Image (spheres, rainbow, N blue to C red):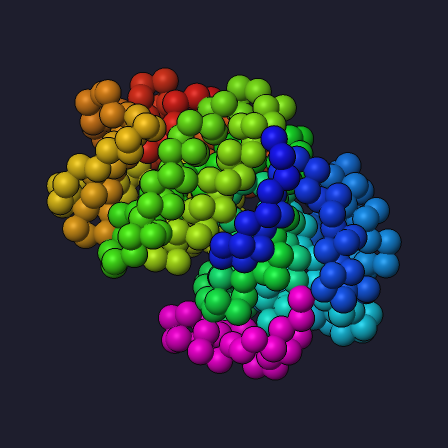
């Protein structure tokens, strides 16, 4: 696989070893003293060591929660200013990449984060006056490295708040699948389901955007085909690259919109500290099943073996194209949402009376076979 440079929606340096170009890309953008935004867990890994060595003058900021908060952002802005930084590098999954976007925003925009809430058209207050920002993804889920939004929990409301503006798109995205090879299985699964959900919900969301529709269908197919593949063989670099592309495609596509799965997943993260991708995996089958009767037409992904029944109400259902739809009765209940994606360490729990997710071995609706354990 060769290195490739894309320019949609921003410049993307993509391929195994792409991160080795970081020093040259910093110099190209005049960044000599960057703030490196990551998280404490990643800071203890060889991936962090590899990337940080490429920018020895960076000021490291890792005080980012799994669901980033307004206080994380304010602390990052303080570190940026006190250290006289001249640009930002985000390294990690969606949490540090989103936090880096918000830090970047507040460095030059003095109003409180809540003012920029997309629900009140706060993006109209955001200008192009922002420091340069290079985003380096280490997961394949949120696609934050190419998206125009950041999701931050505001202190006053304890609500996940979306900040949305084309100006927030990183100056450069670096997608190096080598950085994802060492991910724990439950993170691979959870972030992969986030990518899949982005593509599915973007495709079936209301509104007219045929470009995003085409991107979303392609991204859903890539995630469906490759998430089980990298769960089976974590070192499969081609599969990892395909998942990274699926993640970016989902983030490109969801500028069209998302749906009820994300609306329900956000409070599960803020109230139960649940991993965002896991929350999507939990909710997606139920939202698609709920909306199934409103389906306007079936849509076949030509090569992917996935049938999405499009719904007039903004929802849909995904299923293997060669199988009958999986009824809601096939869904198992579970009180431990960490086990849903086959890993440990997720503190989020739901009451045992609430359902979790479809059994993968039984042709799970909306979940690629082989992902759940």
Describe residue 171's horizontal placement relative to residue 62 as left or right. Answer: left
Quarter location, residue 209:
bottom left
Residue at the image position 39 percent from the left and 51 percent from the top: 253
Quarter location, residue 286:
top left
Question: From what the image shows, is residue 195 above or below residue 306?
Answer: below
Residue 337 position in % (x across, y down): 46, 35
Quarter location, residue 87:
bottom right
Residue at the image position 81 percent from the left and 58 percent from the top: 58
Residue 13 position in % (x across, y down): 62, 47
Task: Please give the range of residues in magenta.
Answer: 107-132
Residue at the image position 19 percent from the left and 52 percent from the top: 313
Q: Nearer the viewer, residue 166 or 313?
A: 166
Residue 16 position in % (x across, y down): 66, 35
Describe residue 63's horizontal placement relative to residue 239 as left or right. Answer: right
Q: How many marks?
A: 0
Residue at the image position 70 percent from the left and 57 percent from the top: 89
Quadrant where the N terminus lies? top right
Q: Nearer the viewer, residue 176 or 359?
A: 176
Question: From what the image shows, is residue 217 above or below residue 229?
Answer: below
Q: Is residue 350 visible?
A: no
């Amino acid at each position: 696989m060769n290195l490739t440079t894309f320019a949609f929606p921003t410049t993307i340096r993509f391929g195994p070893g792409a991160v080795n170009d970081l020093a040259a890309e910093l110099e190209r953008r005049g960044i000599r003293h960057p703030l490196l935004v990551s998280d404490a867990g990643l800071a203890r890994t060889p991936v962090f060591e590899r990337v940080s060595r490429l920018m020895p003058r960076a000021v490291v900021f890792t005080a980012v929660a799994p669901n980033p908060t307004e206080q994380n952002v304010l602390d990052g802005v303080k570190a940026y200013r006190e250290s006289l930084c001249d640009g930002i590098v985000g390294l990690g999954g969606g949490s540090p990449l989103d936090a880096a976007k918000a830090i970047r925003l507040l460095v030059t925009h003095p109003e409180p984060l809540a003012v920029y809430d997309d629900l009140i058209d706060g993006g109209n207050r955001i200008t192009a006056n922002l420091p340069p920002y290079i985003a380096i993804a280490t997961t394949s889920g949120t696609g934050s490295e190419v998206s125009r939004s950041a999701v931050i929990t505001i202190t006053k409301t304890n609500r996940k708040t979306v900040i949305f503006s084309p100006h927030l798109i990183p100056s450069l995205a670096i997608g190096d699948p080598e950085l994802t090879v060492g991910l724990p299985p439950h993170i691979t699964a959870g972030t992969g389901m986030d990518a899949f959900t982005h593509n599915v919900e973007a495709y079936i969301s209301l509104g007219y955007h045929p470009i995003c529709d085409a991107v979303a269908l392609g991204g859903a197919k890539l995630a469906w085909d490759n998430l089980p593949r990298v769960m089976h063989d974590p070192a499969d670099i081609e599969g990892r690259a395909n998942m990274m592309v699926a993640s970016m495609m989902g983030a490109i596509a969801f500028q069209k919109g998302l749906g009820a799965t994300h609306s329900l997943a956000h409070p599960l993260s803020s109230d139960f500290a649940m991993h965002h991708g896991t929350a999507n995996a939990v909710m997606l089958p139920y939202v698609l099943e709920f909306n199934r009767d409103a389906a306007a037409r079936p849509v076949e992904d030509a090569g992917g073996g996935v049938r999405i029944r499009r719904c007039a109400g903004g929802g849909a259902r995904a299923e293997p194209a060669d199988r009958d739809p999986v009824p809601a009765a096939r869904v198992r209940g579970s009180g431990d949402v960490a086990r849903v994606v086959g890993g440990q360490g997720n503190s989020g729990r739901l009451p045992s009376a609430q359902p979790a997710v479809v059994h993968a071995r039984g042709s799970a609706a909306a979940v690629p076979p082989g992902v759940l354990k």
